[in-house]
Each structure stands twice: as C-alpha cells, then as structure tokens.
Image (cartoon, rainbow, N blue to C red):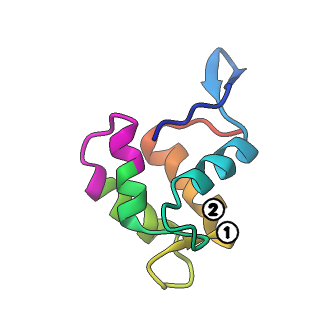
C-alpha cells in the first residue's frame, strides 16, 4: 500500500508530515490491533516498490521497537519515522 497523501515541498524535495505518516501507518495495520508487525511493514514496503522488503521491515521494527515486544505501537511510531528517514529516504516534516 503506497503513501497516497499529498506531499509538501521542503527545500525542493517532496516530504510528508508526521500526521500523514501516522495515518499511513494505521492503514497498514491489517489486523487492526494497533501494532505494526514486521510482516505488515514488509507488505507496505513491497507495495511501495521497495526491494528487500522483509529485510527492511525486520530492521525497521527492530530499530523502532523500544519495548522489545516485536511490534511497533503508537508510542514507537516516531522511532519508525526516524528509521524511514535515515534508511529509506522518506522525508518527514
């Protein structure tokens, strides 16, 4: 599932807001449990045309998961956004 929100332009580059990122994260929560699993994130990365989706999802969840439960929940979304900016090139403002 692609990020289909209108982006903003920052320094000539397309970016999304943190609110748009959070809204997108809710759309990839397939089982609606309020947490993002590595499988749900891999499907989203793959849906955006990303290569190595499983590996990126595992690294993303591992990086964002501060409580070690294997999922990204609401309190860890900002951690996942930081990972997306640093490793996936998504600009979030």
Q: Is residue 40 left or right of residue 77?
A: left
x and y, in percent, of residue 75 in the image: 69, 72
Residue at 33% across, 34% down: 49
Q: Residue 16: say if magenta.
A: no
Where is residue 16, by image quadrant? Answer: top right
Q: Residue 51: say if magenta.
A: yes
Decide: marks 1, 2 in contact (CB < 8 A)? Answer: yes
The one of 57 and 83 positioned closer to us in this rendering: 57
Quarter of the picture containing the C terminus is: top right
Residue at 44% across, 79% down: 70
15 relative to 27, above or below: above
Residue at 47% across, 67% down: 63
x and y, in percent, of residue 56 in the image: 34, 54
* Residue under pointer 2: 77
C-alpha gap between disc 1 and disc 2: 5 Å
x and y, in percent, of residue 33 in the image: 57, 74
Q: Residues within 10 Å of mark 2 (few under 14, many from 20)?
A: many
Residue at 67% across, 69% down: 74
* Residue under pointer 1: 74
The one of 10 and 39 positioned closer to us in this rendering: 39
Q: Residues within 10 Å of mark 1 (few under 14, many from 20)?
A: few
Query: Which range of residues does the magenta coloring cover?
Result: 44-54
Q: Is residue 67 left or right of residue 6?
A: left
12 relative to 69, above or below: above
The secondary structure type at the circle numbered 1 is helix
The secondary structure type at the circle numbered 2 is helix
């Amino acid at each position: 599932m692609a990020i289909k929100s209108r982006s903003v332009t920052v320094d000539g580059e397309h970016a999304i807001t943190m609110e748009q990122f959070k809204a997108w994260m809710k759309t990839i929560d397939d089982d609606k449990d309020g947490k993002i699993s590595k499988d749900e994130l891999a499907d989203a990365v793959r849906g955006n045309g990303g290569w190595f989706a499983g590996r990126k999802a595992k690294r993303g969840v591992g990086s964002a998961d501060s409580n070690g439960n294997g999922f990204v929940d609401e309190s860890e979304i900002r951690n996942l956004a930081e990972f997306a900016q640093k490793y996936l090139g998504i600009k979030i403002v």
